[in-house]
Image (tube, rainbow, N blue to C red):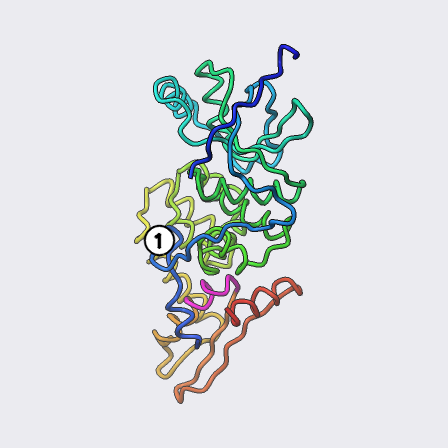
Amino acid sequence: MSKMEIPAKKRVGLGRGLGALLQDSDSVNGTSNAKPAVPVERPQRLEQISSMNEISVDLIETNPYQPRTHFDEEALNELADSIRVQGIIQPITVRQLAPNKYQLISGERRLQASKRAGLKTIPAYIRTADDQQMLEMALIENIQRENLNAIEIALSYQRLITECSLKQEELGDRVGKNRTTVNNYIRLLKLPDVIQVALRDNKISMGHARAIINIDNREQQLSIFNKIIAEEWSVRKVEEAVRELSNANLLASGVEAKGGGVKQEIRSLQFRLQAYFGSKVTVKADDKGKGEIKIPFSSQEELDKILLSIKA
């Protein structure tokens, strides 16, 4: 037996109408309408996990699909201290590439902290997975178990949709969130880069970002963002500013009612529809209640998302 090879020590495993659709929208951070997570089940391609092995930390390479891009050094050191005292409570998950070579699927913080704690081996579940399955499992398990920031979550959701060919509804089932919550995260990726970085670095909150995204004009988005940073605007202040801008933009686009004012219900409906569909929506109405709702799209993909929202 080579010096690097550690014999496997097996242990027992641990054991409606449009109005109704709009009302179903939950907040991005809320869980009141969250669906229970549905595990990924592909018995014909994945081995059943019934035990775990102790694997040398030197035989495990990092995960190329890791969704987390930033690890807090202080938090890692605290986890390492905890591991020295308590050991590893939750095993990591790996796939086997060769007899003495493994690749991490999930648990990079635990693996890094274990190395810092001086552990030579770590408990691990071993799964059989191809590259796409590995990407899907790594993204989903990290979203569910790790404290990713909002931009990392949004990027993970987008990768699951584009690289794993999941629809938003299927993705919601996988991660235990409804379609609207998933869409609210993905919409963050439409924000200017500087705003995304500020959200990633906790310079602004999710509430700030969700309010800004309802403005279509990039210059107006950046203007409000700069005021948030310079004047320390609260989320409520940003929401008020966004409503004022939306009202002004609606007036400029000709959405008027009797007496020259914009109907409050029209403004509210347009605002909610834009948030729900994740797309620009135009609502026009006259003083007799007649009008139209327009939802433009620029690609087949955008159209599919709108249709999926309607069918959800």
**Percent position of residue 143, x then y:** 48, 43
Does 146 appear above or below 103? below
Q: Going 33% across and 50% down the picture, which residue do you hit?
A: 235
**Percent position of residue 240, x then y:** 33, 58
Magenta range = 272-279
Relative to residue 152, is residue 101 drawn left or right? right
Front one among 296 and 98: 98
| Image quadrant containing the N terminus | top right
Q: Going 32% across and 42% down the picture, which residue do you hit?
A: 232
Does 215 appear above or below 52? below
Relative to residue 243, is residue 107 drawn left or right? right
**Magenta-drawn stretch contains 58:** no
**Magenta-drawn stretch contains 273:** yes
Does 129 appear above or below 164? above
Front one among 18 and 38: 38
Number of marks in the rendered image: 1
Query: Counting other residues with Cα less than 10 Å from the Cα at mark 1, is it few (<14), some (14-19), or many (20 or more)?
Result: few
Give the prevailing secondary structure in the magenta stretch.
helix
Residue at far top of view: 3
Query: In the figure, residue 257 lies in which quadrant?
Result: bottom left
Q: Going 51% across and 47% down the picture, which residue do you hit?
A: 154
